[in-house]
Amino acid sequence: MLGTRDRMGDVQREVEKLRTDSEAWKVDTKVDVPAWITESHELAKSFVYDPIILKAVEDSGDLAPINLPESYLKAAGQHARERVVAAGLRLGALLAEKP
């Protein structure tokens, strides 16, 4: 979701993409951990638990490979990038709060 390359140039390109994604930076950084947990849970319920995934895990037996559509994978990548930015901003807020 966030890339598979770990070379510094690749990482720097991904960071630059995150810097220019203005929507991802619209994050409530008020320190409210229960609200952050609820936010993640709601995202899981509304997006991550796609009917294709739920059907695959509900079937008994071994879990077969799940072929998700490209649109899902792109959206999942965007959600992952937004969550990374939110985590960084919120970690900064938590650290700023400490004496």
Image (cartoon, rainbow, N blue to C red):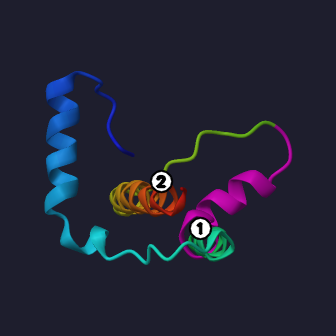
Q: Secondary structure at mark 1?
A: helix
Residue 74 percent across, percent down from the top left = 33, 58
Q: Which residues are magenta?
A: 44-61
Residue found 58% across the figure and 76% down from its top: 46
Q: What's the amino acid at mark 2?
A: Leu
- Residue at 50% across / 48% down in the picture? 67
**Residue pointed to by mark 2:** 68
Q: CA distance from mark 1 to mark 2?
A: 21 Å
Q: Position of residue 4 (x, y in %)?
A: 34, 30
Q: Position of residue 45 (x, y in %)?
A: 64, 73
Q: Residue at x 39, y 61 (%)?
A: 89
Residue type at mark 1?
Ser
Q: Is residue 71 above or below residue 35?
A: above
Which residue does the image show at 45% across and 63% down from the upper left? Answer: 93
Q: Is residue 46 magenta?
A: yes
- Where does label 1 land, which residue? 40
Q: Quadrant of residue 32 in the image?
A: bottom right
